[in-house]
Image (cartoon, rainbow, N blue to C red):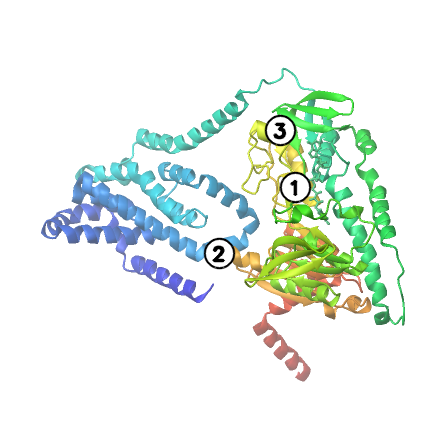
Amino acid sequence: MNTSKTIFLVIIAVLISAFFAFDLQHYLTLDSLKAQQAGIDQYRQAHPLLAVALYALLYIVVTALSLPGAAVLTLAGGAVFGVFWGSLIVSFASSIGATLAFLAARFLLRDWVKARFSARLQAIDEGINRDGALYLFTLRLVPVFPFFMINLAMGLTPIKTRTFYWVSQVGMLAGTVVYVNAGTQLAKIDSLSGILSPALLGSFALLGLFPLVAKKMLEFIKQRKIYANWPKPARFDNNLLVIGAGSGGLVSAYIAAAVKAKVTLIEKHKMGGDCLNTGCVPSKALIRSAKLLSHIKRAPEFGIAKAEAEFDFAAVMERVQQVVKTVAPHDSIERYTELGVEVIEGTAKIVSPWAVEVTTAEGIKTITSRAIVIAAGARPLVPPIPGLEYIDYLTSDNVWNLRELPNRLLVLGGGPIGCELTQTFARLGSQVTQVEMAPRIIVREDPEVSEIVQARFEAEGVTVKVNHTAKEFIVENGEQFLLAETDGQIVKIAFDKVLVAIGRAANVQGYGVDELGIALTPRKTVETNPFQQTNYPNIFAVGDVAGPYQFTHTAAHQAWYAAVNALFGQFKKFRTDYSVIPWSTFTDPEVARVGLNEQDAQTQNIAYEVSTYGIDDLDRAIADGEAHGFVKVLTVPGKDKILGVTIVGEHAGDLLAEFVLAMKHGIGLNKILGTIHIYPTMAEANKYVAGVWKRNHAPKALLEWVGRYHAWRRNA
Ligand SMILES: Cc1cc2nc3c(=O)[nH]c(=O)nc-3n(C[C@H](O)[C@H](O)[C@H](O)COP(=O)(O)OP(=O)(O)OC[C@H]3O[C@@H](n4cnc5c(N)ncnc54)[C@H](O)[C@@H]3O)c2cc1C
C-alpha cells in the first residue's frame, strides 16, 4: 500500500475509533433523539441556516465513515425540519455521504481487488459497465441490502462516480421520504424496525426489481422483434450449420458432430482456411528454411570455418506448399466427413435466421438449421494509400505464390505478420525495408521486447523505419517508390516489391450479414455477446470474423463455446473464457506472451511485481549458441500468483506453455520452483525465473537469525 493510501486509512481508522471510544453512537439512538428534540428545535429556531449546515455535515460524516446511526439521523431530519425540507436535506446529504464512502472504498481497495481477482473481475466489470445503474437502483430499493455495504461494494466496481451519485439519490428517495415522514411523528415511534411495514417493504422491493424485470422483458421483445419478419421453418434440416472451414468453423463442426448433432460445414475456397493455406502453416514452413540459412551464416560461431548455402527460392517456396499439402489431411473433406460432418464446397449466404443458401457447382440449394455459426474469417487490410492501386502489391494471401525472390522488398507494417515476413525475406536474401508508423515495431509488447527484435533485425541487415507514415506510392522512370512522412519530412523509399501487412479486416460482406442486420462492432467485426451469440441469438460468430483476437487457437477456443451454446444453450450457456490467452510472434528471437505485460498493467492501473531471468545465463542456451532473451513474470505484489508472462528467446512459444497451464489452474511460482525441470533444457528458464521471485521474497530477518543459529551451532 502506498503512503497516501496508508495515511488516508490511518485517518479513517482514527475517526472511526474516536467515534466508538467517545461512545458517540449513544447520541444517535432513538431515545437520545427524543430526549434532545426540544433543545434541537430551539437551536434550529435561533439559527436556522447553521442548523441545516450542521445537520447536513453530521449526516455526511456519519454516512461517509459508514458509522451506525443514519436511520436515526433521517428521523431527526423529519422531526427537526419537517417532511419537505427534511427529505431534501437528507436526500442530498445521504447521497454525498454515500458517494464519499464509495470513493474511499475505491481509493483504498479497487487496485488491490483488481490485482487479486483480475481474471474473475472481467465478467463482473462488463456486467457493471452494461447494467451497473440498474443493479444499483435495485440494491437501493430492496431493503435487504444495507446502505453502507452498497456504498463500499460499489466502490470496488468500475461504475462511474456520477452514475453512482444520481442513481443513489433517485433510488434512496422513496425510503428517505418514508423515514423523514416518520420522524415528524417521533413521539409515536418506539423502534426503528416498525417504520417500514411489511407491505411498504414489499412495495420497495417491487419498485427495485421493476427496472430489471422491465429490461429483461425489453430484451425478450427485442429478440422477438428481430425475428418477426422471418418465417420460422416448421422443422429444420440441421441442428447446426457452419459457414467457413477455417480454424473456427472446423472446430465448431467437429464438436457438433462429436455430440451427434446434424451439422453442415460450407467452405467456398480451401478447407483449413487462412491458417493452413495462407497463414500459420506456410509462414512457419518458410520461417524454418530462413532459419536454416541464418544458422549456415553463423557457422563460424559453431566452430565450422565455412558453410555455404546454395538454394533456389522457388524450391523453398515449393517446400512450403509441400508442407501445406502434408498438413492438409487434418482439415480435409474426407476427415470431416468421416467424423460425421456434411461438408459442402460452395458459397454460403444467410437468407433468414434459420436458412442458408448454398451456391455450388451443381446449383443453389437452401439448408435450414436451428443454429448457424459464422466463421468467415478475415482478409488482409489494404489501406487507401494513393498510388497503391497501380502497384502489383503482395499480401499474406498471395505472397506464397512468389517464385522469384524480390531484390528490394518493402514491408508495410510492424505487427506480428509484418515482422515474421520481414526477417524471413531478409534471411532469404532480400534487401528488406520495414516501415511502421508507430514509434516501435510489435507495439503490443513491452518496449524492451521491440528493442531486442528491432536490434536483431538491423543486425541481420533489415532497415527498420519506425515513425514513418506511408503517404503515397509513385513510379518514376519505371522505379517504384514509397513516399513516407517522418518528422514532418517526406522521405522516398525505393523498392521492387511491397508487402502490405498492416492488419486484417473481418469478412462481413456478401453473405447476408448486411441483409439480416447482424450487428457489427465499431471495429467492423461481427458483434457477439459473451456466449458468442450475435444479435440473432441463434446465429453465432467465432474466429477472425468476430475477434477480439486473431489467432488459430482463439478461433478454436471460441468455437467450442459457440457449438456448445448453440446446441445446448436452452439448458445452460457458457461464457467464453478469455482469462488466459497466450500468443507468440515467430520472429527470431521468438516473442511469447500470456496475460499482462507491464504496459497493459500500467494502463489498467493494476499493481504488480516483476521477476526477470536473463536467458543469456542459461546453460542450454549457451550450449546452443542462443544465449539471449529473457523470461519476465508479473505477479501480484507480495504473492506468487502470476498476472502475466513475456518470454523473448529461442522456443519462447513452447516455453510459455508451462505458464499458460499455471495461470489457467491458479498455480503460482512457488509450485513451478518446486517442480523438477530436465537439465539442460530451455525450460529450466521457467524454474529460474521462479527462483528470482523466491530470492526477492526471501524472509531476510528470519535468515539473519538462522545464520546466527548456525554460528552458534558451530561454536557450541
Ligand atoms: C501470415 C499469417 C500468419 C499467421 N500465423 C499465425 C500463427 O502462427 N498462429 C496463430 O494462432 N494464428 C496465426 N495467424 C492467424 C490465423 O491464421 C487466423 O487467426 C485463423 O486462421 C482464423 O481462423 P478463422 O476460422 O476465423 O478464419 P479463416 O481461417 O480465415 O477461415 C474462414 C473461412 O471461411 C471461408 N468463407 C468465408 N466466407 C464464406 C462464405 N460465404 N461461404 C463459405 N465459406 C466462406 C473462407 O474461404 C475461409 O476458408 C496467421 C495469419 C496470417 C495471415
Q: Residue furthest front?
A: 477
Mark 2 to mark 1: distance in Å? 33 Å
- Evaluate whether residue 24 shows in this view: yes
Q: Earlier in the sequence, mark 2 or mark 3?
A: 2
Residue 580: x %, y % from top left: 63, 49
Mark 2 to mark 3: distance in Å? 44 Å
Q: What amino acid is at disc 3?
A: Gly
Say what secondary structure mark 1 lies in: helix
- Evaluate whether residue 466 shows in this view: no
Q: Which residue corresponds to mark 2?
A: 111
Q: Residue furthest bottom?
A: 715
Quick check: is the Cβ at mark 1 less than 8 Å away from ligand 1? Answer: yes
Q: Nearer the viewer, residue 348 or 152?
A: 348
Say what secondary structure mark 3 lies in: loop
Q: Nearer the viewer, residue 625 or 464?
A: 464
Residue 215: x %, y % from top left: 44, 31
Q: Is 364 drawn above or below residue 216 in the view shown?
A: above
Q: Which residue corresponds to mark 3?
A: 512
Q: Earlier in the sequence, mark 2 or mark 1?
A: 2
Q: Which residue corresponds to mark 1?
A: 544
